[in-house]
Image: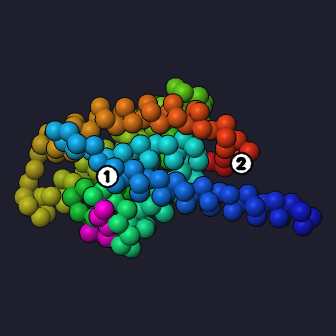
């Protein structure tokens, strides 16, 4: 009886270690800024690869860990920023929206199955929900602090410039996860 408990504890430790590594990976990706007309980071790539490798449940817990680290002041967000101000500011809804990607991925892959198509559609569904939450949040916070702003304006500032880069990061994450996942196969995903 004691041996299965020890095995379960070791598995739990491995899960926690993977979640901590994933939260660190997301932070690292947040710090990498790619200059362009609208500079962007690899933050969403970190979210996508985390969900793909850890599954929806553990991936979401890793994202939550990342957000909590940032909330308490560890500079893990883009531009080495942190604090509740980053989460409650204009673009905080996009950060909080990262928490939706894992559950959306789970829902989609349970409905249509895993595999490249199911995983890609799951991430895409999550990204659309993240964009929707972030855009609504931006409009509310911006309106309260600065004045009214239209939906088309917010989309042109916060979503449209990022769609193509995010789709490229998603494709890269799907390909890399397919190659890395066999190395992690000895620790089964739980969600």
| Towards the viewer: 12 or 144 | 12
Q: Secondary structure at mark 2?
A: loop
Image mark for residue 176: none
The residue positioned 44% from the left and 47% from the top of the image is 46
| Towards the viewer: 45 or 112 | 45
The residue positioned 51% from the left and 30% from the top of the image is 175
User: Which image quadrant for residue 111?
Assistant: top right
Colour pattern: rainbow
Q: From the top left corner, tell me how far across and down residue 51 is, in percent.
A: 52, 45
Mark 2: give few (<14), some (14-19) or many (20+) Cα within 10 Å: some
Magenta residues (range):
80-85
Q: Is residue 164 magenta?
A: no
Q: Is residue 152 left or right of residue 58?
A: left
Q: From the top left corner, tell me how far across and down residue 77 is, in percent.
A: 34, 59
Q: Secondary structure at mark 1?
A: helix
Instruction: Tell me if residue 160 comes above or below residue 61 in the rendering.
Output: above
Q: Which residue corresponds to mark 2?
A: 187
Q: From the top left corner, tell me how far across and down residue 160 is, in percent.
A: 22, 36
User: Which image quadrant for residue 53?
Assistant: top right
Label 2, label 1: how far apart the Cα atoms are: 31 Å
Q: Residue furthest bottom?
A: 72
The residue positioned 31% from the left and 35% from the top of the image is 165
> Mark 2 near mark 1, Cβ–Cβ under 8 Å?
no
Image mark for residue 94: 1
Q: Is residue 159 visible?
A: no
């Amino acid at each position: 009886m004691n041996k299965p408990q020890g095995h379960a504890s070791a598995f739990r430790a491995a899960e926690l270690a993977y979640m901590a590594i994933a939260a660190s990976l997301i932070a690292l990706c947040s710090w990498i800024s790619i200059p362009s007309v609208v500079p962007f980071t690899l933050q969403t790539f970190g979210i996508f690869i985390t969900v793909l490798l850890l599954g929806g449940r553990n991936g979401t817990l890793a994202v939550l860990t990342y957000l909590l680290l940032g909330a308490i002041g560890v500079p893990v967000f883009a531009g080495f920023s942190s604090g509740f101000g980053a989460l409650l500011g204009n673009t905080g809804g996009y950060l909080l929206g990262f928490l939706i990607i894992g559950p959306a991925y789970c829902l989609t892959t349970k409905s249509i199955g895993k595999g490249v198509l199911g995983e890609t559609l799951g991430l895409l569904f999550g990204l659309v929900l993240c964009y929707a939450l972030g855009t609504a949040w931006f409009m509310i916070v911006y309106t309260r602090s600065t004045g009214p702003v239209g939906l088309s304006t917010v989309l042109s500032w916060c979503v449209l410039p990022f769609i193509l880069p995010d789709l490229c990061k998603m494709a890269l994450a799907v390909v890399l996860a397919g190659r890395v996942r066999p190395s992690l196969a000895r620790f089964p995903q739980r969600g």
